[in-house]
Image: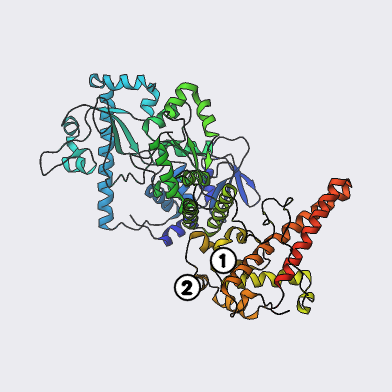
Amino acid sequence: MSLSPQFLDELRHRTMLSALIGRSVKLQKAGREYRACCPFHDEKTPSFYVNDDKGFYHCFGCSAHGDAIRFLTEAKGMPFMEAVKELAQAAGMDVPAADPRSAERAERATGLVAASEAAQSWFAEQLQGIAGAEARAYLAKRGVPDDLVKAFGLGFAPDSRGKLKAALASFGNDTLIEAGLLILVDEKEPYDRFRGRLIFPVRDARGRTIAFGGRILDAGEPKYLNSPDTPLFDKGRTLYNLDRAAPASRKAERVIVVEGYMDVIALARAGIDEAVAPLGTALTEAQIERLWRLVPVPVLCFDGDKAGQKAAIRAALRALPMVGPDRSLRFVTLPDGQDPDDLVKAGGKAAFENALQSAIPLVDLIWRHEAGATALDTPETRAGLRRRLAEHAASITDQGTSEQYKLEFRRRFDALFGAAPPRQHSEGPPFRERQPFRRGDFRKPPPRPTSAGARSIGKSGVDRMFARAVIAGLVLHPGTAAAHAEALAGLELGDPVLERIRDALVDAAFTGRSLEGGGAHSILADAGLEAATEELCRTNGLAFSFLRSDADPSRATRDLGEAIDVLVTRPLIEQALTEATRTFGTTTDEASFAEQQRLTREKQDVERRLMDLMQPEGE
């Protein structure tokens, strides 16, 4: 049945939430709200609040949150429509009549659920009978106790083509086929889908049996057989054990994803009930979304073999576009050749808990995967790594998170390979950005007379105008951005517009997009920066060679590289000099004095380089 948002809003408005919850939970008045010990998890100090004005409840302990309908479905286990009908009756509202097609679908679904539940009961009976001896022996060998056999509803399908069909004949072949219990091929007589297998019922969030998985006991393929998709069951949206794991996750404040049925049961045997598993497929986007409804950061636990690692990276890349400030993943890799069952058998719950302590965040998994994908011993392979990382970061929909991933990938890339070195000077070694206290000598160009214009600009004016000139130079000579991308990315320009222009060009260079032949102007226009760029180039007040249309292109790019080097070097030297001066003032020893003097000379050198760049041609 489809209910309009208007009807549901009116139903919520007419329901006094505190009165509804107060029937089963002892509420205490707390200002304009009510508080109580949370009905969703065990606690001694009240952290569960009910707000009638806003119409919702919230627990600050386990994050349970919802309205009147959700309280009935989650706390009381009622189906959605039953909850709506109960609230509507109390509020004096009539539930809109279902259209014939909706009623027909609901009736058919009810029949499929009844058939699946009957099949589960029949499979469970077979497990306890003579035919189930081999399956019982297998479960005993795996250490599955009787209480978990019952809790998970495990069963056995005899090796017969028609025993289930005969047992459930009252439902009719059409219903059993639609429920995935029988197989129909070419209009021949349908036969049982599951034969000679240990049976794992698959339940929905309400605990209703909707599908099955079967493990073969003898040699044969496939090892596991699952129900096909049906009107009840979509394997890409369903998680095994969700009905038991959802309430357990609120108490534990976590949910753990493992690879299969027996992994889930092994963890339950160890007292870890908040585990789920996908159903014969890689974890899907819909399943990940379902996990995020339980906790912000689910933990994915995969075997240490190649198949497990492939499953982990597939899940990571599927989740990546959807991550954000309040939703991500963590990953645990078990020792090669071990699964959760092996770990629990060897060391109990403590062994698995210790493994969880080594969980790594999503960003680490992606970095390790890409950095280890190939040898990184050539410029080409390193460029490939940088491009792949940039593409991953760009795939994230949330812009703030995407930017943080870009920055983090750049930081790791630079830490591994070093930032792109600035242009080598003709005299002396280059400034090494990562060693601010040991730079060596800079180039000392023969001083030229300082222009009146240059002398008239104070320090703050130089900083502001110099930064504007460098960014304007990048717009005119965008190919330079690729050679100095890492150095430019870390600059604090003090002007949001300049930083946006810089970021657009550096991001393009970082991802390998072409900046030549009008590419830069197209990129800036796409970013909404066309007018700002024109204004910057039109109003720049300095006459560097790279800002003049008649300048030699090779000299322009050379001087622009020198200007970027100065722009990066200058604040680092000043910061180092300030620290060295402070240290000398405290210790007054000879070594501190020598360091302070060395940095003073380096500052003078970089200031001379700056003034040299600022000279108009001919002065």
Disc 1 element = helix
Image quadrant occupied by the N terminus? bottom left
Mark carried by residue 5: none
Q: Which residue is mark 1?
A: 480
Q: State which quadrant residue 4 falls in.
A: bottom left
Residue 616 vertical placement versus 606 (above, below) = below
Give 411 or 11, whichever is nearer the viewer.
Answer: 411
In this view of the protein, can residue 40 be seen by the observer?
A: no
Q: Which residue is mark 2?
A: 517
**Between disc 2 and disc 1, whose residue precedes?**
1
Give 184 or 89, whichever is nearer the viewer.
Answer: 184
Using residue 494 as the reference point, say whether residue 131 is left or right of it: left
| Residue at (63% x, 37% y) in the render | 45
Q: State which quadrant residue 427 falls in.
A: bottom right
Q: Report the Cα–Cα distance between label 2 and label 1.
A: 13 Å
Using residue 261 as the reference point, say whether residue 409 is left or right of it: right
* Amino acid at dot 2: Gly
- The x and y percentages for residue 606 are 74, 63
- The x and y percentages for residue 112 are 26, 42
Residue 609 vertical placement versus 579 (above, below) = below
Say few, some or many: other residues with alpha carbon within 10 Å of mark 1 (under 14 / 14 to 19 / 20 or more): many
Using residue 591 as the reference point, say whether residue 142 is left or right of it: left
- The x and y percentages for residue 249 are 49, 38
Image quadrant occupied by the C terminus? bottom right
Disc 2 element = loop
Give 21 or 546, whichever is nearer the viewer.
Answer: 546
Using residue 280 as the reference point, say whether residue 383 is left or right of it: right
